[in-house]
Image (cartoon, rainbow, N blue to C red):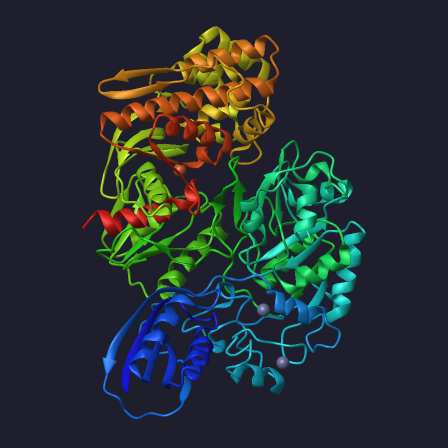
């Protein structure tokens, strides 16, 4: 006889891990007990040594589907002669250290019960078990236990209680366990908050309203959606009007994979992502003219559609009644954060909707839908890492020297903490300029530190002094480290691939602050997790009107025209677009106007030059439409769009001026915009790859990493990646971490945790 302590670390709470230990320990005839504590799961077990070995192996290798075992550490103890095996209740003392599980889509077993008229959960919208259901969004504190969730106020009935305490049951210690007799219920409200119906009647009325083309707010896992019939042009147009959203595409929820396939062309990888229990929105190429197609207004002018499958029982029940694709867009007006608190939701969404389908299980943490994009090669790339992914830890390529809090960027903000060998990033918080988003940011910092047990020793922030996240960091009474924005982008790509570098990093995005107050955004860096050196950049041009250039891409078109073709061309273009052109031209011409190397602004300029988009109603609209219009043109089929690569004081300067003048000449010659766009993408991509390969070789590097918001552009990414690969170098493209500013906190955390020791 021997006795051992097995310490299991990782995501092992709230995922059915203790019953799993119980079942195997009992099957092996071992004595002892298992408990959750603040460091994970603790097992003390006694029996023949070879069976103890077997249990340790099973705990690591055969963990339940939602568990993520980081380590199983075994320590010998003196045998005590204990008999029987038990599960010990959690205690709430000590400093918590375990990241909780992500929210998980309804499992097949639960769906079967919901569909079975003989089951006591028939038609019940809050059915869940240890394999599925809400987690991160309902947790107030840890250890993860019912009293620390928003289910605390519901007392289980005797049937639920029996399941909850039976180690052999699928609902053993399923914290949100509930049934129609004891759990939450649906409620249907009018826009003014008055109650119209309850339970099944609420569901039926909401379904009929959707069929009739009405706008219904639907409470989901991490917030409210605004839902309408996606096949109704009138309903979609009405939703756009009420939500004050002009063009930005809406996501669509379909009942199953077959329905998804009928709307979009899906690679095997895209199908895996779509139907995974994480249930992200998957952006994929739409079919032309499918039967039962969605209205054009869902994603105006775009060749892709954002699809998702139902992920709560309520979604399944609604879609089974409405039987058509539904727009499910975040419940907010234009760019505000998604509504998740019930009173706030009714106040904010009520005026926009006909009905509110809600319930009495509170959402503690707001969590938007995650978004991934299917790339041409089949793989998927993360664009927004939130529900279903947060707060799952990512492995750090090394051990953190200090506990780090990283506060991220200003737009698409996320925050992250690093300790030991992992980094944990929050859900998508959004644009900190909105007061509600800023409040959510402050709450997220607190909550994430609490859940992970990290008391930060150092705070990582962007160099930009005006970012609200930077100001927040500098206000904390802690040591701080400023991390350059594009260095953080490249570091986030390294973490994505478990690398430390050095690599030749190509960081292209909107704008980020360089070390001396310059506005960067098209940078070639030699970088690892310790340091970076700028070895090249895009040619700088004036940025006329600062932030106004974000929403008025025509300003950058004038700047690039002025630089590439000349003043007369800029003047001619400006006259045709906006009466303020003389002021913009004067700025472009003035030596004191700040310049930028932004790659994102170059795309803005080209989108405006070809007449696609002079004014943007959402971030990145011009570049997105520019990429979209080239969708049907094969790679490399439009030759002759070339750029210059110069050397300036040891730095390589990628000068797209020849590309820009070619774009203008082709546009004047009435060449179709699709071909101009393809030529621009392919020419810029090849030129960038050339510069990156030359620089990589010069610095003895074998790997090129592509990061920054511009690399959300699948065509550009593909062209650069192919050319780098053909040159015999390795290329790193984002997969699990967003290339945009949503990944900045992860890069900051890695640099400060691993690099600056
Ligand atoms: Zn389930
Ligand atoms: Zn019950
Ligand atoms: Fe950026």
Q: Position of residue 521 (x, y in %)?
A: 37, 30
Q: Is residue 203 above or below residue 183?
A: above
Where's residue 374, x and y in %? 54, 41
Quadrant containing ligand 2: bottom right
Q: Residue at x 34, y 51 (%)?
A: 472
Task: Residue 120: tell me if it is visible.
Answer: yes
Q: Which of the pair 71/207 is nearer the observer?
A: 71
Left or right: 285, with 564 as reference point = right
Q: Residue furthest front?
A: 50
Determine the residue positioned at 50% across, 72% down.
Answer: 149
Q: Which sits in the foreground, 499 or 608?
A: 499
Residue 597 place in picture, x, y as percent: 36, 25
Q: Quadrant of residue 734?
A: top left
Residue 753 appears left or right of 227: left
Quadrant that contains the N terminus: bottom left
Quadrant of the rendered image containing residue 727: top left
Look at the image and tell me whether residue 326 can be seen. Answer: no
User: Residue sitting at 67 percent across and 63 percent down?
Assistant: 314
* 65 with respect to 91 (left or right): right
Where residue 671 sits in the image (x, y, percent)?
60, 12
Exactly how many numbered labels are in the figure? Answer: 0
Look at the picture and state if 571 lies above or below 287. Answer: above
The foreground one among 348 and 528 is 528
Depicted 249 relative to depicted 590: above or below: below
Taking the spot 74% from the left edge, 59% from the top edge, the residue there is 320
Nearer the observer, 409 or 180: 180
Is 104 left, or right, of 535 in this rendering? right
């Amino acid at each position: 006889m021997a006795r051992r302590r097995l310490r299991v670390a990782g995501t092992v709470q709230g995922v059915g891990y203790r019953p799993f230990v119980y079942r195997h320990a009992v099957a092996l005839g071992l004595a002892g007990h298992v408990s959750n504590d603040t460091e994970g799961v603790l097992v003390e077990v006694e029996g023949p040594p070879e069976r103890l070995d077997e249990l340790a192996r099973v705990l690591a290798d055969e963990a339940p589907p939602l568990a993520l075992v980081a380590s199983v550490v075994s320590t010998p103890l003196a045998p005590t002669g204990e008999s029987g095996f038990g599960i010990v209740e959690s205690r709430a003392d000590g400093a918590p250290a375990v990241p909780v599980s992500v929210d998980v889509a309804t499992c097949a077993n639960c769906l079967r019960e919901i569909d079975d008229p003989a089951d006591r959960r028939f038609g019940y919208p809050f059915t869940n078990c240890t394999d599925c259901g809400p987690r991160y969004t309902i947790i107030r504190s840890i250890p993860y236990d019912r009293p620390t969730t928003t289910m605390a106020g519901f007392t289980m009935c005797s049937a639920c209680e029996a399941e909850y305490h039976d180690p052999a049951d699928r609902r053993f210690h399923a914290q949100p366990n509930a049934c129609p007799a004891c759990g939450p219920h649906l409620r249907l409200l009018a826009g003014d908050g008055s109650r119209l119906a309850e339970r099944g009647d609420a569901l039926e009325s909401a379904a009929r309203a959707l069929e009739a083309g009405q706008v219904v707010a639907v409470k989901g896992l991490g917030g409210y959606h605004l839902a309408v019939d996606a096949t109704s042009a009138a309903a979609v147009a009405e939703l756009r009007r009420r939500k004050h959203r002009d063009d930005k595409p809406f996501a669509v929820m379909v009942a199953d994979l077959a329905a998804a396939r009928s709307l979009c062309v899906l690679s095997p990888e895209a199908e895996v992502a779509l139907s995974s229990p994480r249930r992200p929105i998957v952006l994929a190429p739409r079919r032309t003219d499918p039967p039962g197609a969605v209205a054009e207004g869902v994603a105006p002018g775009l060749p892709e559609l954002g699809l998702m499958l139902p992920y709560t029982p309520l979604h399944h029940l609604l879609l089974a009644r409405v039987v058509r694709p539904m727009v499910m867009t975040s419940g907010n007006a234009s760019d505000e954060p998604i509504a998740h608190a019930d009173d706030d939701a009714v106040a904010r969404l009520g005026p926009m909707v006909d009905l509110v389908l809600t319930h009495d299980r509170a959402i503690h943490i707001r969590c938007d839908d995650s978004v991934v994009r299917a790339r041409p090669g089949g793989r998927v790339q993360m664009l927004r890492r939130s529900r279903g992914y947060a707060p799952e830890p990512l492995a750090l390529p090394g051990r953190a020297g200090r506990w780090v809090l990283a506060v991220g960027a200003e737009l698409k903000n996320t925050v992250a903490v690093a300790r030991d060998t992992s980094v944990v990033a929050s859900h998508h918080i959004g644009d900190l300029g909105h007061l509600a988003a800023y409040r959510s940011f402050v709450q997220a910092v607190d909550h994430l530190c609490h859940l992970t047990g990290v008391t930060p020793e150092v705070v990582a922030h962007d160099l930009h002094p005006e970012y609200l996240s930077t100001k927040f960091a500098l206000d904390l009474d802690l040591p701080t480290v400023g991390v350059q924005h594009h260095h953080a982008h490249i570091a986030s790509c390294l973490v994505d691939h478990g690398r430390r570098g050095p690599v030749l990093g190509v960081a292209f995005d909107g704008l980020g602050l360089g070390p001396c107050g310059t506005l960067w955004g098209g940078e070639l860096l030699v970088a690892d997790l310790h340091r970076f050196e700028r070895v090249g950049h895009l040619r700088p041009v004036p940025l006329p009107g600062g932030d106004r250039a974000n929403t008025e891409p025509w300003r950058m078109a004038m700047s690039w025209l002025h630089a590439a073709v000349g003043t007369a061309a800029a003047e001619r273009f400006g006259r045709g677009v906006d009466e303020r052109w003389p002021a913009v031209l004067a700025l472009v011409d003035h030596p004191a106007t700040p310049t930028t190397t932004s790659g994102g602004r170059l795309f803005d300029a080209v989108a405006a030059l070809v007449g696609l988009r002079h004014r943007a109603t959402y971030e990145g609209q011009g570049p997105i439409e520019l990429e979209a219009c080239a969708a049907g043109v094969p790679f490399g089929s439009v030759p002759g769009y070339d750029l210059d690569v110069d050397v300036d004081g040891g730095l390589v300067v990628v000068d797209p001026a020849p590309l820009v003048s070619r774009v203008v000449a082709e546009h004047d010659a009435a060449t179709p915009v699709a071909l101009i766009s393809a030529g621009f993408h392919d020419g810029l991509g090849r030129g960038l790859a050339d510069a990156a390969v030359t620089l990589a070789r010069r610095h003895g590097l074998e790997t090129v990493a592509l990061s920054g918001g511009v690399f959300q552009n699948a065509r550009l990414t593909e062209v650069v990646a192919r050319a780098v690969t053909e040159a015999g170098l390795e290329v790193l493209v984002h997969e699990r971490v967003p290339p945009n500013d949503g990944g900045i906190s992860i890069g900051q955390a890695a640099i400060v945790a691993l690099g600056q020791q």
